[in-house]
Image (tube, rainbow, N blue to C red):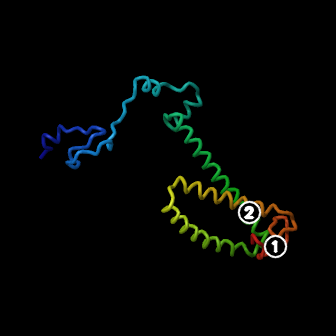
Amino acid sequence: MGPAPAEKDAKIVVGTPSKDASAEAPVEGSWKGMELETPAATAAATASPSNPLEALFERLYGKMTWEEKLRLLWLAGTLFFIIGGYWLLRSLKDPVISTICGVEYIPKAKMLSVVVVTVLVFVYNKLIDLFPKHQLFYIVGGFYATLFTCIAAALAAPATSSTSIYNTDPSPYRLLG
């Protein structure tokens, strides 16, 4: 049993509703057709890159417009700084805690961090419902930048301050402890 003759000859055209869709006419302006490329744009897109670096980039990532390359560089830079910041903070965490509170408080700090992260996950999930993702990225990034700038300023205070990293008397009652 093969397809009906009407189905066999039916063609799907981009930008038009299929015959299986509802019988209602589409709302004006709701369907957009695909724009065809001009012969000049097609020739420019198929041209080989002029230098070896562009050829390597094209081989690795495919053909991209200038805007796509710029977006790729911005996102790669963002990933670089996120991973670099994480690596730096991870390696500094234990020495800073042992200097401020003492080595014996590192396990307690790690257990407390699980509770804090759990609460932050709930807050983050609520923020996802309230803001678009691109705005939430800037909100969370701005919060972390502000928080770590304040912590850096407190740690860089003179040695007489209780928050300073230069104050070598460990105590869990210090402000950053």
Which picture quadrant has residue 52?
top right
| Residue occupying the point 27% across, 40% down | 16
Q: Nearer the viewer, mark 1 or mark 2?
A: 2
Left or right of residue 162, residue 112 in this image: left
In this view, the residue farthest toward the right is 160
Q: Residues within 10 Å of mark 2 (few under 14, many from 20)?
A: some
Give the x, y percent position of residue 96: 76, 65
- Say which amino acid is labelled 2: Ile
- Say which amino acid is labelled 1: Pro
Considering only vertical position in the picture, is 12 above or below 52? below
Q: Nearer the viewer, residue 99 or 161?
A: 161
| Residue occupying the point 65% across, 74% down | 112
Q: Which mark is residue 88?
A: none
Q: Nearer the viewer, residue 33 or 29?
A: 29
Q: Quadrant of the C terminus?
A: bottom right
| Residue occupying the point 77% across, 69% down | 98
Which picture quadrant has residue 124?
bottom right
Q: CA distance from mark 1 to mark 2?
A: 17 Å
Considering only vertical position in the picture, is 108 above or below 159? below
Give the x, y percent position of residue 95: 76, 65
Q: What kind of element bears circle 1?
A: loop
Considering only vertical position in the picture, is 160 above or below 1? below
Give the x, y percent position of residue 83: 63, 53
For marks 1 and 2 on the same chain, the one whose residue lies earlier in the sequence: 2
In this view, the residue farthest toward the front is 28
Q: Nearer the viewer, residue 14 or 24?
A: 24
| Residue occupying the point 80% across, 75% down | 171
Label 2 sits on residue: 151
Label 1 sits on residue: 170
Give the x, y percent position of residue 142: 63, 56
